[in-house]
Image (cartoon, grey):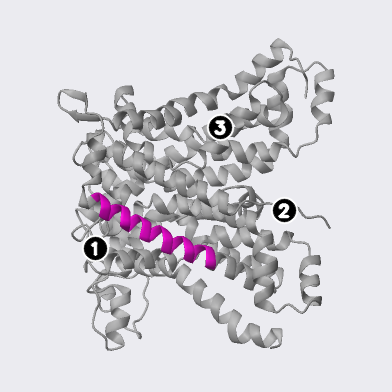
Amino acid sequence: MKMSALKNLFIWPVLVITGFFSLLPLIWLLLSAFVPENSLALLKPNLKFLPTLENFSGLVQASGRSTGTIQVSRIWIWFFNSILLAVGGTFLHLIIDSMAAYAFARRSFPGRNLLFGLIVGSLMLPQMVTLVPLYLLLIRLGINNHLAGVLLPGLADAIGIFLLTQFMRTLPIDMEDAARLDGISEWRLYTQIIIPLSVPGLTALTIFSFQGIWNQFVLPLIVLQRSQSFTLQVGLSYLSQTEFGFHYGWIMAGAFIMILPVFMVFFLFQKNLDKGLRIYSIHPS
Amino acid sequence: MKLHWKKSQLIWSYFFILPAFFFFIVFRLYPLLHVFVLSFQKWDIQGAKWIGFKNYEHLLNSQLFGMAFWHTLLYTVLVVSFWMASAFGIAFLLQSFHQKIKNLFRGLYYLPHVTGVVVLSLTWAWIYEPQIGLFNHVIKWAGGQPVMWLQDPNLALWSIILSSILVIPGSGVILYSAAFAALPTAFEEAAELDGANRWQKIFFVFLPLLKPTTLYLLVIYTIAGFQVFDRVYLMTGGGPVNATTTLMQLIYLTAFRDANYGLASAQSAILFFAVCSVTFLTFRLLRVDFTYQV
């Protein structure tokens, strides 16, 4: 069979159908978030599509107000918590991972290969099995029920160290030698030479860290028990299982709010993504 | 490699890795070791008591644990095989297209994975909703009987599996595409000269040469499959009547609903050994024993 005929008869349909089903949840989410709930129930092929923000106001009102000095809808508290975790966590990842990656990629010291092997090897371990001891540890540290209890365990970021080490190995070596001859201190060598050269690698890490922290679920679910400290993910799953489980329009409005930040990051940095993905593990779902 | 190091240089090196290793040891290594200790203990109000292998004995005789193990295995085997096949297949089909179309489709397949499992699971629960969900709407409109996707114990696990495999694994498509692009064309040309057809090329040229990518994806997907939790918790909570309880869902309930930390740790330890042995076997079976030069 000719290639072009094969393409039209077989390849295009396969790609379009698999693509459609992959995007189906997102399409359905968008439609449901902006269609009034009572029309969702009567969905017909000839339904007129009138976008509305009804679901959003329903969600904001029904999620209840926060207690304390600032009285706003809990949705915004959760949104703020998620942003705080994702931005703070990403920032700390960049510092901690780039320091370790610099040592692994550019310096030599006894035990380097062994320690790097440990980091890479830990990627092959099922992370979730440590959930119970981790929870007991957080209780002993007194940071269960606190955003710090979600933030700190995430700072052991093997995949980020691995990515940056791979990246920094590709940097030219003469820069460092020249700088050392000039008598620059080791700390300034790292902050003023290595960091600026590593910006592409750090950009990829920013995207993946933000996405990873924003989308994490199990740890915040077990650590955060009070609704004031929920993340958006935990809060929305809580609402979907308890207070308004049957208001799917509201849930989808919440889901829409939930995907906005990661989509913004995704589209802003899309060009760098491909490069990063090749050496970076992705959160499989 | 230098044979001796200057002391000040050494101190700097360890200083740079110190923060990473601090968090690593406290929040990864220590809990990993502690889980085995906990698995020999019983927890109640008075604190921890050593009970030897009792937790493990209990699990061996527990029908629920056996069920959870079976559900996890079934989910992992089906979903991982489908993900591997679809990632390879789609990357293979995309090969012949113009770069722009390739990028478009790769972005399209990756997009759902940006949103995370929580959003996908909540949306799938809504698609499966029995009265006004999308799937039953379409079925009713076509004149069929509505299906109890997540409420029928015989169907619920299959619905969860379906929700996983209908979303093509974007990461795999991207990694396989990159691997295809990096392959030297000499092998394909040689196979064509020898008269190999399309299927022969896939099985005797592409699959062997892409073994490193296959190994990597197989390992990360299998590890993820064994730990499936979010979508179970959000779509069914393990029900109806435990029909969708997976190992992680069971560990979650044992530890955080029943506060039975010892038993949950024993369950975790078994999950740990199951994943490690499967990973080890995968590495042995797919050992990369070639290098090529062009």
Expressed as whole percent of the image width and height from the top left, the position of residue B89 reads 58, 70
Expressed as whole percent of the image width and height from the top left, the position of residue B269 reads 35, 39
Gap between marks 2 and 3 measured at Cα: 26 Å
Residue at image mark 1? A247
Q: Relative to residue A187, is residue A26 drawn left or right?
A: left
Relative to the observer, which residue lies in front, B60 or B88? B60
Mark 3, secondary structure of its residue: helix
Going by the numbered disc 2, the residue's amino acid type is Phe
Expressed as whole percent of the image width and height from the top left, the position of residue A138 reads 33, 28
Q: Mark 2, mark 3: which one is toward the viewer? A: 2
| Residue at the spot 26% in from the left edge and 59% down from the top edge | B236
Relative to the observer, which residue lies in front, B38 or A206? B38
Image height check: is A245 above or below B202? above
Q: What chain letter is assigned to the residue under label 2?
A: B
- Based on the displayed image, in which of its 4 quarters is residue B264 positioned? top left
Going by the numbered disc 3, the residue's amino acid type is Leu
Whether residue B83 is in magenta: the answer is yes
Residue at image mark 3? A118
| Residue at the spot 30% in from the left edge and 30% down from the top edge | B38
Q: Residues within 10 Å of mark 2 (few under 14, many from 20)?
A: few
Q: Relative to residue A263, is residue B147 drawn left or right?
A: left
Q: Relative to residue A121, is residue B135 drawn left or right?
A: left
Which quarter of the rendering shows the N terminus of chain B? top right
User: Which segment is the magenta one?
Assistant: B65-85
Residue at image mark 2? B290
Observer able to see residue A73: no
Q: Residues within 10 Å of mark 3 (few under 14, many from 20)?
A: few
